[in-house]
Image (tube, rainbow, N blue to C red):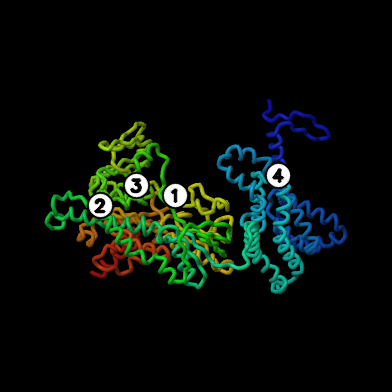
Amino acid sequence: MLPLSFKGSCCGGAVVLKSGWQKKVFVLGLIGLIFYGVHFFGLGQYLSLEALKEHQQSLDEFYQQQPLLMVGLFCLVYIVSTALSIPGALVLTLAGGALFGFAVGLVAVSLSSTIGATLAFLVSRFLLRDWVQSKFRDKLYRINRGVEKEGVFYLFTLRLVPLFPFFLINLVMGLTPIRTGAYFIVSLIGMLPGTAVYVNAGTQLARLDSLGGLLSPQLILSFALIGVLPLASKRMLDFLKARKSLRRFQRPKQFDFNMVVIGGGSAGLVSAYIAAAVKAKVALIEKHKMGGDCLNTGCVPSKALIRSAKILNYAKRAREFGLPQMGSGQEKADLSEVMDRVKKIIARIEPHDSMERYRGLGVDCFEGQAKILSPFEVQVGDRVLTTKNIVIATGAGPLIPDLPGLDQVGFLTSDNVWEQKELPKRLLVLGAGPIGCELAQAFSRLGSQVSLVEMGDRILGREDVEVSELVLKRFVEEGIEVKTAHRALRLEAGSQAQPHTLICEHQGQEVALEFDQILLALGRKANVTGFGLEELGVEISESGTLVADEFMRVTNYPNIYVCGDVTGPFQFTHVASHQAWFVAVNALFSPFKRFVVDYRVIPWCTFVDPEVARVGVNEEEAKERGIDYQVTRYSLEGLDRAIADGEAHGFVKVLTPPGSDRILGATIVGPHAGDIMAEYVLAMKYGLGLNKILGTIHIYPTLAEANKFAAGVWKKATAPQGALRWLERFHSWRRS
């Protein structure tokens, strides 16, 4: 029995196909036959500019004798070539203008290209859509919903600004739920401007009969229009998108402000500062404390606490430095005094971020809860502020898990731990990312018995394995109990005399960990609710952050910008400030001038001891992304300053392409790693390689010399051995 069975009758040479898969095989065979015919008869050679010019006179004569037949044959060829994605559509478009003139050529090409595109769309839908949708249904759910909601406008965007080849658009859109009629109409309208420009260029090429014609103003203008088309189309789309998203809101006749900033943290402060510096009218709204998390609950207090813990740790190491031992060496800190110092440091920095200072800079500051009423209106208290642009810089807060028993035992986070007055006897830190590791080590050094619990296989999971292992070794040496691969299941509250218990799952078994207080360090959740975004329908990512485009705008409103932790992708203070510059400039000067946000060189540091700093890719990421790399490693054990400081541990690791000194990424583990890293950040930003670092004088003795020595290790490893052997012979000859 044949594998392909046609159940039907042959009438007049026609075969009636009964099953869907047989029809698909038939269509594929027909397409293959046409492709073979095009190749066998060499028909592709006629779809070129050279062939067009060579046969132009005979084609013109035929058009004069049989205009309808000529146009019909042209349309048929165009439809078939477009439907089957045969290269040559551009040449045919130019030919339409050259043969028929602008008006007839535009109509013929527009209709033919649209019909051909729709046929390709239908073929793709018939052959592939059911299989693709069934196999990737979960992954395509959001795409399908987006196409159902905004598919027409999205298709219009692709047609108007051809970022992707048209044949690819035909094939991909056939896999989506967009209706065929809508596809035809939108394609016809969307391709019309580009078609007109190319048909016009074809009319000019038809008049070209010598090389001198290449410099004719008409031809130069025609091809200039082709170059300008993508930019003009993009501008038109931006205008249409803005009109579409803002049309249901009443635009004020006059605005109170050029920009209203919601949130007085790092991102909001920098954007307001820049706006005021360029003399824009800007308002800043903060509902709680100026300075945001960084000043009040994040960077500043945590580094102050880490510093106090480090000093106490140095006191315990006094004999190591040739000094008398302070007491028993097991002293505990008075946490209330440590926290008083933390608050004094916050108070000392606070004026830098105060409303008084920003009012002096020209910013109108408001204290209270902001409410976005529309893309042009923000309410604070009883006042409604009208504005050209809104900047959302509302930051993020600690992520609180849905963990049974959590409400019964109570918990600490990076927000409220600073109110602690007594040192916990037994502190359990849940989460071994940067925040968890920093606070775990600090409280351990201050005198708490600390357990660090992590669901993953290792602490600091974003770093290389050897980095995690080095920090883990230090933690264990200092008495921190580290539990990796432990997944928290529930909490059981103890009595006044009994500790609380965390029940974890580890290797299929339940494990009980006792504690007096628990500190949650499981990441941060963006603040996206409670101030009007729900009503506007602003897009939120799967991770809970506001989705932003390359200009830091939310995806559905062209005058609402976002920056800082509320959008990511990096939740660092320095990244928030970096984004704020782009936000302020783009909001105030668009559409005349705007910039795409630049994430190419993003450094960060985890302030454990030893510090862990990184910029660019590490080995784990390079392997995941298939990047070919060479590792250069320099150990700080041999660095003079590190030895003198009693901190000769850690390393500098640099990744470069094989045979090149270009820096792909750098990781530093050791004392003051965050400060030492600045040289690599600068080098990567401005394209400087290890040879430049090697040729730079570094002060002796400093920790920064490690960068120069790492460059020296790279130079030695990549030195040309053949040339060195010849040099050895040369010097031997000179000694003779």
| Of pointers 1 and 2, the one earlier in the residue sequence | 2
x and y percentages locating residue 531 in the rendered image: 51, 54
Question: Residue shown at 27%/44% (left/top)?
Answer: 450
Residue where numbered disc 4 is placed:
122
Mark seen at residue 517: none
Front of the two marks 1 and 3: 3
Mark 4 vs mark 1, CA separation in Å: 44 Å
Q: Secondary structure at mark 4?
A: helix
Residue type at mark 1: give it. Lys
| Of pointers 1 and 3, the one earlier in the residue sequence | 3
Mark seen at residue 335: 2
x and y percentages locating residue 644 in the rendered image: 20, 61
Quadrant hosting residue 3: top right
**Left or right, 170 with reference to 358:** right
Residue type at mark 2: give it. Leu
Residue where numbered disc 1 is placed:
525
Could you say which is closer to the camera, residue 407 or residue 142? 407
Residue type at mark 3: give it. Leu
Question: Residue shown at 64%/60% (left/top)?
Answer: 250
Front of the two marks 4 and 2: 2
Residue 664 visible: no
**Left or right, 593 with reference to 22:** left
Residue 147 visible: yes
